[in-house]
Amino acid sequence: MNQYLTEKQVKVLTTIRDFFLENGYAPSLSELQIMLHINTKRGVVNHLESLEKKGYIIRTSEPRGIKLVEEEEYQYMIGIPILGYANAGKPLAIAEEDRLGLLHVDKALLSHRSNLFALIVNGDSMNQKIIDGKNMKDGSYVIVSKDAEIMEGDPVLAVLDNSATIKSYKRDGEMIILYPQSDNPIHQPIYLDQYSNSLINAKVIKILERP
């Protein structure tokens, strides 16, 4: 399976792999046509036929019947979209989704596996927060779950005035406190009314070093 692939074939194969990692199943012909900007389904099929002849995929008659030859490897992986940056400092980074690719992570490393996305930490207001022995340093990846239950002391992603920040969560009566955990004394807590329009969007469940 070391036959030469054209640049276009590499793009098709990479698109199939990334889709499989993110969704757990193969893309349809229509989805591939859109993602690859190919004019016709026949054009997509031509690329799939070439990949099959070269031993990279197997096609079946089933819906979404594209099988990666190394698919067993991908059954144990999950693809997590990197949606941009979040500040671990003042909430200045605009909270817009700016997809920066996929993190490929072994499912065994994750306590939650649905509704996940990743961000890159910008700042040092949480550099003393540790999850599974890893500090939330400037430049780290964090994996965030929208489904995980948020408890006292958990690091959360909050959107304040359309800006994203990561802080630890505390409830004090009718008030929510988002507080830093840092060796830099410049960082101070943020105090929110429980009915504030600010959004506690998700919980940070994993920190990954960014080489």
Image (cartoon, rainbow, N blue to C red):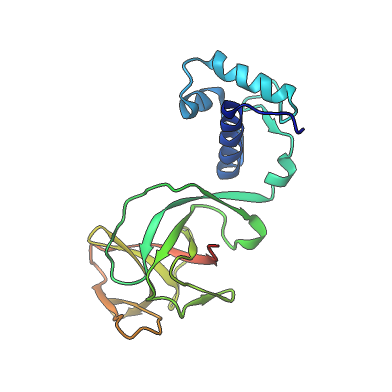
Q: Is residue 185 left or right of residue 12?
A: left
Q: Is residue 80 left or right of residue 64?
A: left
Residue 117 percent location from the top left of the image:
47, 54
Quadrant into which the C terminus falls: bottom right
Residue 119 percent location from the top left of the image:
44, 58
Quadrant into which the N terminus falls: top right
| Label total for image | 0
Front residue of 122 and 157: 122
For the point 42% across and 65% down, the residue is 121
Judge whether residue 121 can be spotted in this image.
yes
Residue 18 percent location from the top left of the image:
57, 40
In this rendering, is residue 4 above or below 71?
A: above
For the point 61% across and 21% down, the residue is 47
What is the quadrant of residue 154 in the picture?
bottom left
Front residue of 121 and 29: 121
Front residue of 21 and 177: 21
In this rendering, is residue 197 above or below 90?
A: above
Judge whether residue 174 can be spotted in this image.
no
Q: Is residue 8 left or right of residue 126?
A: right
Residue 204 percent location from the top left of the image:
47, 66
